[in-house]
Amino acid sequence: METKTSDSKWETTDEYVAIKVDRRRTMQQLHSAKLLQRNPENPWKEIAALQMLGSDHPNVISLLGAFADDLCLYEVMPYYSGGNLSAYMHAHQNGLPEAQARGIFLQIINGLHFMHSRGVCHHDISTENILFKEDENSLRCIIVDFGMCLRTPHNYPDDPIGTTDDITDVSMGTQRRLIVSRNHCGKLRFMAPEIYQKKDCFDGLAVDIWSVGVVLFILLTGRQPYEKPDEIKDAGYHDLVDMSYYWNASKVNPCFSWGHAVSNEATDLLKNMMCPDPRERATLGWIGSHDWLREKQIGVQQ
């Protein structure tokens, strides 16, 4: 899939637009993706999800329109000139002040809450999939790229986001929706351990929480939780999913290892968001009442 930016305005909104162009995949291409155990992005899922979510939330991308020809499927979306969070953090390699990181994090959490409350898990949260919109003296976060999203709370036979054999009901104390695991989805560095380990099923909402935890770690330190590009692969993930490697009291807080005096409150939040057991992982409700978020400073200085 490629994204093209138009220098003209969408006639119904008078806004500059970005157009995602997806060449129709052949059966051979889809079969190759299956052999590689990758879940290719599905533009039809993205269209269905964005149509259902609508354009009511300031931190979630909206769909202006979609159309197709014999070769391609086109998705028309607002154009945001502020770049993505990955590029922003590349320019801030020492991390951000906690107040500024909190402002970004809150916007991401607000967007995530909107999606989850409507039964959509993103399944591919990363710094690359968070764009910035310039709003006067601040930057507004926009969650984008819903091509791997899944529907979680209801089981509709004709649901275009997740079909009946994607989802099963499992009660574990509190009602949780567990999605049947098929292939790896998302970017490896942001992937929850239960996805990497190919568990039989997973909690889609908890998967997003882990990924946003990785994003928060990057905001606070300017670094990934893993030192080397190939460390996850080399370690087989077994050392890294056991977050006691990072959070055990006898070890150095990884945030400090990068020269950052991250607060105890932020460290506690990270610890709970990146809990390897999804049943014990922080929920959005728990995050929303956390001490670190009491100073709700929305907005990002440029």
Image (spheres, rainbow, N blue to C red):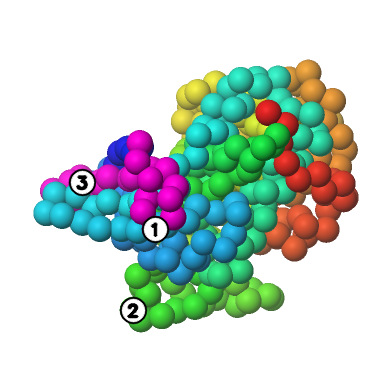
Asked whether 284 or 129 is in front, the reply is: 129
Occupied quadrant, residue 11: bottom left
* 100 displayed left or right of 194: right
Horizontal arrangement in the rendering, residue 176 relative to residue 297 (left or right): left
Point out the stretch of residues depicted in magenta.
Answer: 7-33
Question: Disc 3 or 2, which lies upstream in sequence?
Answer: 3
SS of the residue under disc 3 = strand
Taking the image as shown, residue 35 lies to the left or right of residue 294, namely left
User: Is 259 drawn above or below residue 8 in the view shown?
Assistant: above
Q: Which mark is residue 48?
A: none
Residue receiving disc 3? 23
Q: Check disc 1: other Cα within 10 Å, few if <14, some if 14-19, many if 20+.
A: few
Q: CA distance from mark 3 to mark 2?
A: 25 Å
Is 28 one of the magenta-colored residues?
A: yes
Nearest the eye: 102 or 260: 102
In the picture, the quarter occupied by the N terminus is: top left
Q: Residue at x 48, y 48 (%)?
A: 144
Specify the amino acid type for callout 3.
Arg
Q: Earlier in the sequence, mark 3 or mark 1?
A: 1
Q: Quadrant of the C terminus?
A: top right
Percent across and percent down for residue 257 are 76, 21
Res. 32 in view: yes
Q: Earlier in the sequence, mark 1 or mark 2?
A: 1
Tag 1's secondary structure? loop
Residue drawn at the location 72% of the way across and 56% of the way down = 282
Residue kind at label 1, given as amino acid type: Thr
Residues at circles 1 and 2 in contact by the CB criterion of under 8 Å: no
Label at residue 12 = 1
Instruction: Identify the residue at horizontal 55%, vertical 33% (top origin).
Output: 82
Give the labeled residue for mark 2: 158
In front: label 3 or label 2: 3
Foreground disc of the pair 1, 2: 1
